Image (cartoon, helix red, strand yellow):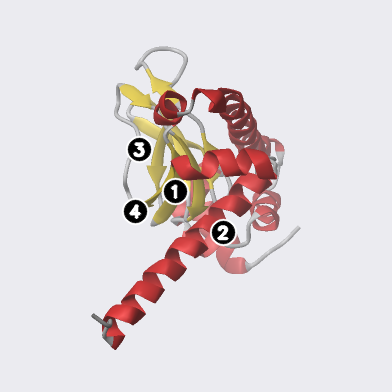
Amino acid sequence: MPLDNLTRNTFLYCTLQILLVLKTLDELLSNLGCDERQRALLLPYFRHERLPRGLELSARRGRWNNLSIISTGYLRGYFQHSFEDYTLGILGPGIALPPLEYSGRFPVDIFLESVTRAELETFDIQEAIIRSPEILPTCLLLLLKSYDRFIGELAFWASLGRLPRGESRVAEVLDRDDHLVGSVPNGVLASATGMSLRHFVRIKNSGKRP
């Protein structure tokens, strides 16, 4: 039985979307340093996830068991002290989110929250190893690369506090990702750059660069 135009167009659209996701994921893995053979082994075990704004990925106690790569949107890593949230960094496209454990004890836990709508490519480590034990070395390599990228990103945000002027901090953020300002809420960016909300908004609106 031949397909009508609507069904055919829907099928073609869905196929195109799948191919676009796979292409994006292949590029994300390549940017993490995975070669063609490693990417071919890993790709079948990823799934695509969409996150609404304001979703917390971690329970207050528990685990973030999977490894995910942000394809679009932004998340923040933060900790709590004396009932206040302190943003450690803002994580954007291409950043890997490695497995994290939340104990509720010292040292301070890092929590993850989507601050815009976001899309993740999520890798189920346990399923991959159970179904294909030979993939274990590649999984370990991916884990090492993801932790390295995650720590490097947090280190960048921590280094902003060494800059004496707010204009310099905002300039560093814009040089790293000019889509951040305008996409991420001002309060989150102010916390991440170690400035008051009023000071950050004044610099943002003035357009000053050092």
Residue with the mark numbered 3: 57
Any part of residue 103 in sight: yes
Residue at point 55%, 57% (across, down)? 24
- Is the C-beta separation of discs 2 and 4 under 8 Å? no
| SS of the residue under disc 4 | loop
Residue with the mark numbered 1: 120
Residue 127 picture quarter: top left
Q: CA distance from mark 2 to mark 4?
A: 25 Å
Residue 179 x %, y %:
57, 62
Tag nearer the camera, 3 or 2: 2
Residue with the mark numbered 2: 23
Q: Amino acid at mark 4?
A: Arg
Residue 104 x %, y %:
34, 17
Residue at point 59%, 44% (across, down)? 40
Tag nearer the camera, 1 or 3: 1
- Does 68 sit above or below residue 199? above
Tag nearer the camera, 1 or 4: 1
Residue with the mark numbered 4: 53
Name the mark on residue 52: none
Q: Residues within 10 Å of mark 3 (few under 14, many from 20)?
A: some
Tag nearer the camera, 2 or 4: 2
Q: CA distance from mark 3 to mark 2?
A: 25 Å
Q: Amino acid at mark 3?
A: Leu
Residue 148 picture quarter: top right
